[in-house]
Amino acid sequence: MKNLSQAMPPMLPCAFAVAVALSMSLAQAQTQTDAQSPSISSTVLPQVVVSANRSAQSRFDAAAAIDVVQIDSFSATTPLVNLSELLSAVPGVQVRNRENYAQDLQVSVRGFGTRSTFGVRGVRILVDGIPATMPDGQGQAATASLTAASRIEVLRGPMAQMYGNAAGGVVQVFTRNPPRAGEATTGMVSVGAGSDGQRQTGAAFAAGNDTIGGMIDVSKFTTDGSRDHSAAERTQLAAKLVMRPSADTTVTAVLNQFDQPKAQDPLGLTRADFEKNPRQVIAAALSFDTRKTITQKQAGLVVDHQLSDSDSLNARLYGGQRQLTQYLGLSGVALNTAGGVVDLDRDYSGAGANWTHKMRVNHLPLNWVVGVETDKLHELRRGFVNNAGTPGDVRRNEDDRARNLDFFAQMDWTFAPQWRATAGIRNSRVKLEVDDHYITAASPNDSGSVEYHNTSPVVGLIWQVTDDMNLYANMGKGFETPTLAEVAYRSNGTGPNLGLLPSTSTQAEVGAKIRSGDHTLDMAVFSARSSNEIVPSLVLNGRSIYQNVDSVERRGAEVSWQTNWSQPALFAKKLTTHVTYTWLDASFQKSYVNAQNVMIAAGNRLPGAPSHSLFADAQYQFNDALSAALEWKTESKVYVNDVNSDVASGYGILNIRSSYGFRLGKTKLFLFGRLDNVLDKKYAGSVIVNDGNSRYYEAAPGRRWFVGLRAAM
């Protein structure tokens, strides 16, 4: 593996040395403000978002379906380990915690991303403006440190296309900033424990002034796993250094490290095995010792400079490394297989800049932004025979590369007192390259490359009917290239499937945002039709082979309603409720034949996409210190394959949470507890779409508890 410093700007390690020195030298921690009721609601007001048009604006005024999840790492009533803990209340979004840390979370937005069996597909993920999605469109959600986060923005619909390749939706995580002059220096430690051997510890410290400030957050999580052979351990570090050399310039340096030395993989279960014992592990997982280790380091530098009252510039530079070793549930001993052990060593980096200009036309505001982004990755990918959990002979050895160059422009024009138009365009060029070094009689030189081009336009209109009601409509075109993993194999021979085409989509939505006193209501209706949809077609000798199909349609509706109840007087605004509902109709509109010569009928549902999803939450604040809440989550059945030959049944689960904040001298403490799946419902928390061995089902945990204690000084 290359040294991390070779992939990053040389000034970044020095910057973080300054941050650590600053943190150690500033004054001791002061008492934080009184504990507030824990809130991870997606409609807390006031909210400022940047996802819709890359400049700060009110979420209510954004001409798009966008939600904000506010995170207080001190008073959140959840361990803050997985995104699935935080995004259940966001309509149109599915984040499935597979309880399998050898595989990433399954994240989908409006049906985009449901086919992914590993990593995140069809949804772009960014952390502090730096992509966690690679140039080929595949990303990882687990590497974002949630204990260091301040908010998560989720953008859905056509406006997401302004983020480029694979932007069926956008999930942005923002880490908290260090304090400025007049704000308290903060320090926090946390411990937690729960069912299945869950254990969590963490520590954070932040200090600063108007010129310089630093924040560092470290957390560790271990679990024995809710299934046999599913233990895991991970440690995360997030640090931020904010420097303001002048009133017009802010320089932000960020560092993230993710270390997962242990993550056992229990593999999926067939329906018969799932119904017999959902906690069991199949024999292949034990005989091949299926598992994964991951180490990732990343650093970035972001500069914001105010050129004038009308012009501002944002520039960013980042680099990182990721090393992964995974043991699969097969030997891969045959010469024409990829092997049962995957060894991947990746370097990646990128840069971007955008210029924002504000002006007035007929005394009304017109803002525009133009920018450029480029990203690249280089990975050495090798495969070995899996000899009962130890690597054997080489079966794959290649250099893979992906890079993109994108130009974009977006305009936001208030052309009448109550009317505003938005228009944007993004031009993308993505290149994939494979340089094959494993050349034998059975596996000839399969090197090759392919380049994709696309232009994605979006247009939108928002009508401010009143100060408390906005109506909007958007249309746009999307673009999703195959990933390096998806082009890796073809069905009629060895080597990459460079004939696989990118998927394109045409999307539209109309929506309404309404607020009245303590009530907020968001509604949206959407439609998306895709051509050349990339679907898994065949699993052959451990190789997943993909193909393109036409006319895949996703349409549906979203509703989100939140209120603080002031009537009857008994509640005295202490009761807060939140309800979200999503209807999704995702289906193949044309029949096709897959690589196994099986007919997929027109009208078949997209696997992994439930038709109905409901989340309801009711929290009561007894006093300034004590609160309790009930959560209810329901999903309808999901099909597990394109043939629609089997389903994972629908389910409904009840969760309970409570918290209590108190002080011991100058130390503020926050105690919280959760009881999830109170009714001990047996259900499949996720499905492995189109699994070649019919092991589709990944069991969710039964009734489980978690208790945590945080101390702030």
Image (tube, rainbow, N blue to C red):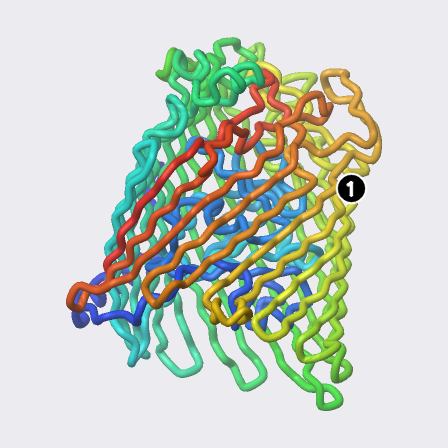
Residue drawn 32% across and 29% down?
A: 224
In this orientation, does residue 439 appear?
no
Image quarter hosting the C terminus: bottom left
Question: Residue 521 lies in what quarter of the image?
Answer: bottom right
Q: How many marks?
A: 1
Residue drawn 71% across and 40% down?
A: 502
Residue drawn 60% across and 22% down?
A: 691
Pick the residue in front: 540 or 685: 685
In this orientation, does residue 279 appear?
yes
In the rendered structure, the answer to whether residue 209 lies left or right of residue 584 reads left
Q: In the picture shown, does residue 245 fall above or below 52?
A: below
Report the residue marked by disc 1. 553
Residue drawn 49% across and 21% down?
A: 396
Pick the residue in front: 402 or 236: 236
Disc 1 is placed on an element classified as: strand
In the rendered structure, the answer to whether residue 260 lies left or right of residue 454 reads left
Relative image position of residue 553 (x, y in whole percent) = 78, 41
Q: In the picture shown, does residue 275 fall above or below 190?
A: above
Relative image position of residue 712 (x, y in whole percent) = 24, 62
Question: Residue 49 lies in what quarter of the image?
Answer: bottom right
Image quarter hosting the N terminus: top left
Amino acid residing under circle 1: Glu
Q: In the picture shown, does residue 689 fall above or below 1?
A: above
In the rendered structure, the answer to whether residue 498 lies left or right of residue 218 reads right
> Dot 1 surroundings within 10 Å: few (below 14), some, or many (20 or more)?
many
Relative image position of residue 30 (x, y in whole percent) = 21, 71
Relative image position of residue 696 (x, y in whole percent) = 58, 23
Pick the residue in front: 448 or 664: 664
Q: In the picture shown, does residue 186 fall above or below 380?
A: below
